[in-house]
Image: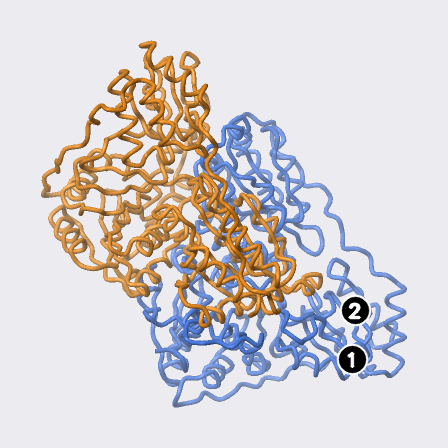
Chain colours: A orange, B blue
Amino acid sequence: MNGAESLVRTLVEGDVDVCFTNPGTSEMHFCAALDKVDGMRCILGLFEGVVTGAADGYGRMLDKPAATLLHTGPGLGNGLANLHNAKKAHTPIVNIVGEHATYHIEHDAPLTADIEGIAWPVSHWVKTSADAPSVAVDGAQAIAEARGAPGRIATLILPADTAWNEASGTAPVPAVLPPEPVDEGAIRDCADILRSGEPTLLFLGGKALRADALAMADRIAQKTGAELRTEFGAARCERGTGRVAVERMPYIVDQALAVTGAFRHIILVGTKVPVAFFAYPGKPSVLIPETCRPHTLATVDQDIAGALAWLADELGAGDLEPILSEPERPALMEGDLNLESLGAAIGNLLPEGCIVSDEAITSGRHLHPLTRGAPPHDWLFGTGGSIGRGLPEATGAAIACPDRKVLSLVGDGSAMYTIQALWTQAREKCDVTTVILNNGGYAILHGELLNVGANPGPKAHDMFDLDRPDLDWVAMANSMGVEGVRAETAEQFNRALAAALSNEGPNLIDAVLPGAA
Amino acid sequence: MNGAESLVRTLVEGDVDVCFTNPGTSEMHFCAALDKVDGMRCILGLFEGVVTGAADGYGRMLDKPAATLLHTGPGLGNGLANLHNAKKAHTPIVNIVGEHATYHIEHDAPLTADIEGIAWPVSHWVKTSADAPSVAVDGAQAIAEARGAPGRIATLILPADTAWNEASGTAPVPAVLPPEPVDEGAIRDCADILRSGEPTLLFLGGKALRADALAMADRIAQKTGAELRTEFGAARCERGTGRVAVERMPYIVDQALAVTGAFRHIILVGTKVPVAFFAYPGKPSVLIPETCRPHTLATVDQDIAGALAWLADELGAGDLEPILSEPERPALMEGDLNLESLGAAIGNLLPEGCIVSDEAITSGRHLHPLTRGAPPHDWLFGTGGSIGRGLPEATGAAIACPDRKVLSLVGDGSAMYTIQALWTQAREKCDVTTVILNNGGYAILHGELLNVGANPGPKAHDMFDLDRPDLDWVAMANSMGVEGVRAETAEQFNRALAAALSNEGPNLIDAVLPGAA
């Protein structure tokens, strides 16, 4: 077998059995190997940001890596933004990049680029295979690196001749490093703080937002009077009825400071001290006052659930009944379609087991409370701040969980970065309902202009408006084989959402909100 | 004035008066400055690949830089592929990237990334401004760096506080380094070779493909019996009636070797020894046989036109009349729409002064001969091999040359990478006619599978087909405010192209070719 086939077989044997790809000439032997090896599902994206974003959504849902297959430096470049998001989400990804044949690189052909240089800023591990017999070993290592706690981006660069030359077979995946052990001293210190009675915030991130870990955090809070908050941008939060409801740290600096200002201690569980998304003139970067002291219970690469359980035991809270969300749905509204009526419909209709991919930006911040009492579901937020995550992430989540409905909430500005994802959803019959929260512009930037103290005029505002021309979202969806409908009133949206969620996807709703034409 | 305003003023004073942008929070003060400074035209793209590709098209046509304005590391990442293409095209670009405030970077906020690390592989010069008073000086330096021969990518990274803090005013652009002087020894050596009577190829690239330089190369060829060829991927070639017609070096390795095999010498004029686009098993990387010796008349960063004129003088050829293309148009065809009838229509109808942006890949290789006798026009090819260049490049060319028609020839596979460019064309009323050469797939990859000796099966081929679902190009264009029409026969295409070229753009023709559904 050649190097490409040895890699595909190694991936499948290593439980990496989905590959999102946009291949080129240097990846031909990998593609040809797909017909020789059973068990690898290969999914085409028409733009590399779809490929890497889908791998992020897949990895978030299954806690195991998909592979990507990208074409040389520029293909990797196109996938960079969603690899950045995935890296910040601690998503495991085996990121495979084709390269010129080893002997061809020195000739500076058109596509020659510094692939390792492009890869490093978004990778935890980068390796270029030296020859065909190394490919399987390197691929197995990449799987282990990707699976290392808390989930990492392992970039394997595959020169074309390492793919087409003869290899010696597959390679076993080396032992995956377990999470860093929890520090007993940290447990005792945090327990002491919680026993002190001083106002304390448990600040939760990463895998602390899974149902069991949240239940443990709630027991600690009940026992000690501590309060709970999640990080603003959580990769995946298990919520809804039967789960512990925790509010997010606000995005707005002053609002976040109002939250943290009430506490003398902030205990970090799978996350870091909260910091502002951006700097603003005259505002602090760190979102806790000097009177609030941070303490780390568990870092993101430690056994977070284990740390919470240990702490609960230490506090004698392990047997308490956690306070779980009761079923409670907002009523459907009538009249104008706005964030309130749209949120009511989502809260009213969200199906059990739904995966909500939230890239609604400004429009989405208020949706969380309205879905607290909906049936159990997962909510995926942006972690790296790069827009264009939503549609690909929803695609990957649907591939990962074919039995679950995916609700993709995305701003009109956000949707345009990686709109090609709709085609992949149509091709793969992904059960995704996309809601375009259409307010006719980059609403967040109109607000941010004021937040940073700029004094904008018409030319500046013109850079944040998406009218001239208006985007026709139904035509856009149809052009890529996805059904679409436009909703201009609450009743229309209610009907459209109910229909979309009860049919197999993909489908799209253009939710026309104030601001849109 | 703040740092942002000092930069915008410095750019305008330095003759950089168009800025392609997709801004975010860290670029707000730059946007706000647009309303305080006259003379800067700011153009919004809904994806950063549109932004950087448009800057490439603009710079190719005007030989002067546009600015970009991108949002942090991920925004730069999204623009990377077309910066790669622009770098290989030697296009001048002042590439401005917003960054977190200097004091905010250490806090590892979601968008924090190694921006310099991402920038270097696609830049000739990278600098992060240290403080507000430095911004104007750094901006002026960036202009000078971008304008340095042969045209360079200068990336200026602008932390938000350097934009909003008080600056001291504008800065003058430092002297731009002139092209490297031509080497007298190279002139004499090349003259000796050409006088020897041994079979010699003048291999032309870069600014050797402008009309005057081509005329000089033709005089040399007439005098000495040398033959002329251009590089396969030329940034911009002036051609049509009244200009010297030169064939391209073929893409296919065996075809290229058949060309160069006839020569004992290859004289390089503004380009390098031809190399294969990709490596293929058993084929050489370098596209000249060992019996053919390369000699450099002028490198791409030298005075190429001057070197040709000097060489012509040295040979006593300077006064010869160049052989120029005579008017000659293919007749319109009827019946099936295929590459032949499509090419005939383009050759028949191409208007004077047209700018042809060619990203037709496999479908476009035969179009060149059919347009040799069309009125004078420019032809822009891919230089860096990264797909997704065409629609943005056409957009930028239209902004650069508002009085000229732009014909954007793009494969269906290629168009999807940066399809958002259509919206910018509609917003800016760009006079662009886009022809989608719709063959229903990545046709080049079906061919490349065979070229690399892979043995493909159905799963491999499935990765190169764009059916399931078919793309509806008219709906796609309409969704972004661009008129579109579908042409399935030669007559339909002839009528559609005549109408599109005689109306103001933007408009789009879906040219349904064999292979498409």
Residue placed most toward the observer, B204 or A289: A289
Residue placed most toward the observer, B21 or A511: A511
Which of the 4 image quarters holds residue B248? bottom right
> Chain letter of disc 1?
B
The residue that mark 1 highlights is B221
Give the residue type that dot 2 points to: Leu
Q: Where is residue A124 shown, x and y percent of the image?
A: 54, 43
Earlier-in-chain disc, 2 versus 1: 1
Above or below, B237 relative to A206: below
The residue that mark 2 highlights is B308
Give the residue type that dot 1 points to: Ala
> In percent of the image, x 73 and y 66: which residue is there?
B272
Which of the 4 image quarters holds residue A432? bottom left
Spatial distance from mark 2 to mark 1, Cα to Cα?
Answer: 11 Å
Crowding around mark 2 (Cα neighbors within 10 Å: few <14, some 14 to 19, many 20+) is many
Q: Where is residue A504 shown, x and y percent of the image?
A: 20, 60
> In percent of the image, x 69 and y 68: which residue is there?
B205
Above or below, B267 relative to A319: below
Lateral position of residue B276 relative to residue B416, left or right: right
Residue B93 visible, this angle: yes
Q: Where is residue B219 shown, x and y percent of the image?
A: 78, 78
Residue at disc 1, secondary structure: helix
> In percent of the image, x 47 and y 55: which residue is there?
B50
Quarter placement of the C terminus of chain B: bottom left
Which of the 4 image quarters holds residue B239? bottom right
Residue at disc 2, secondary structure: helix
